[in-house]
Amino acid sequence: MRVSVLGSGSAGNATLVEAGETRLLVDAGFSARDLARRLEAIDVDPASITAIVLTHDHGDHTRGAGVFARRHGTPVYVTDLTREACAGLFRGGEDLRAYRAGHPFAVGRIRVEPFITVHDAVDPVAVAVVDEATGTRVGVATDLGRPTAQVRHALAGCDFLILEANHDEVMLRTGPYPWSVKRRIGSSHGHLSNHAAARFAVELLHPRLAGVVLAHLSGECNHPALAREVVGTALARAGYQGWLEVAPQDEPLPFVDVEALRLRLGPAQLTLL
């Protein structure tokens, strides 16, 4: 299984997961043209995308879904409530396929396991995706609000984790947003801070966890080096020796081969944990 975060932040979010010939796009929060540009930057033909899964209705996760689906004939998996909230994106000619949180479904070689989050959207979910051939498990969990018991259960045992580290608490408190926005971001229905992400990442740590990508960083209230320091220090103290990266907003991360990453980890992390 290979993974590339095409970009992540308040201006747009999309993640590509590839298993064999199956290429799954989790969210499509950039314009269709920009999505195509980002895919081509990692040598992926936009027409080769097997399906798109939308996690919730916010524009930074859905913006390009309709145009991309029409342009490339790509099926879009979406919950009924999210489809209604995003009605303006769709014109009726798209291949829209309904799914429900708690009900796994197959897209080619990939099993998608959607689970409820507490973000302030009409029907928010996050997903774990599993390569049916190898059992490799990847969690894509941004816009979490707070890590509930259901979220913890769904992300347990992931080989690779994409986890939001949205803001630094001090930068949020002193930053330029109106107080109403600050309250929303910092609430239990908003986004995880760096320290909250660090605590949650340590909770999810287990010997097979080979890679972590910090995602959905605020451009106003966070900095990649700060997020990496806070989360990386907490993981290192817990014995983690795996790969850690921060997803940029403006360009895709190169493909990461999750199985190869896990093999390189070797027995050292198992011993430490």
Image: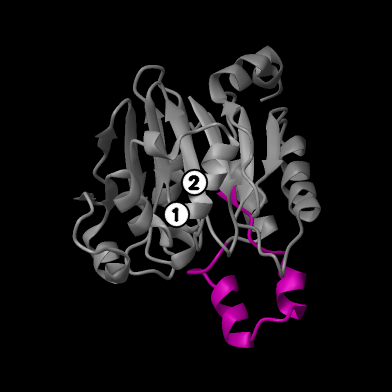
Residue 233, percent across and down? Answer: 78, 43
Q: Taking the image as drawn, is residue 74 in sight?
A: no
Residue 232, percent across and down? Answer: 75, 42
Residue shown at the point (36%, 57%) measured from the top left:
67
Residues at discs 2 and 1 in contact (Cβ within 8 Å):
yes
User: Which is nearer the eye, 172 or 43?
Assistant: 43
Q: Quadrant of residue 192?
A: bottom right
Residue shown at the point (66%, 81%) measured from the top left:
177
Q: Amino acid at mark 2?
A: Ala
Q: Which residue is mark 2?
A: 36
User: Which is nearer the eye, 150 or 60?
Assistant: 60
Magenta-colored span: 163-191
Which mark is on residue 243? none
Q: Is residue 28 shown left or right of residue 227?
A: left
Q: In the rendered view, tell whether residue 10 sits above or below residue 94.
A: below
Which mark is on residue 32? 1
User: Which is nearer the eye, 116 or 33?
Assistant: 33
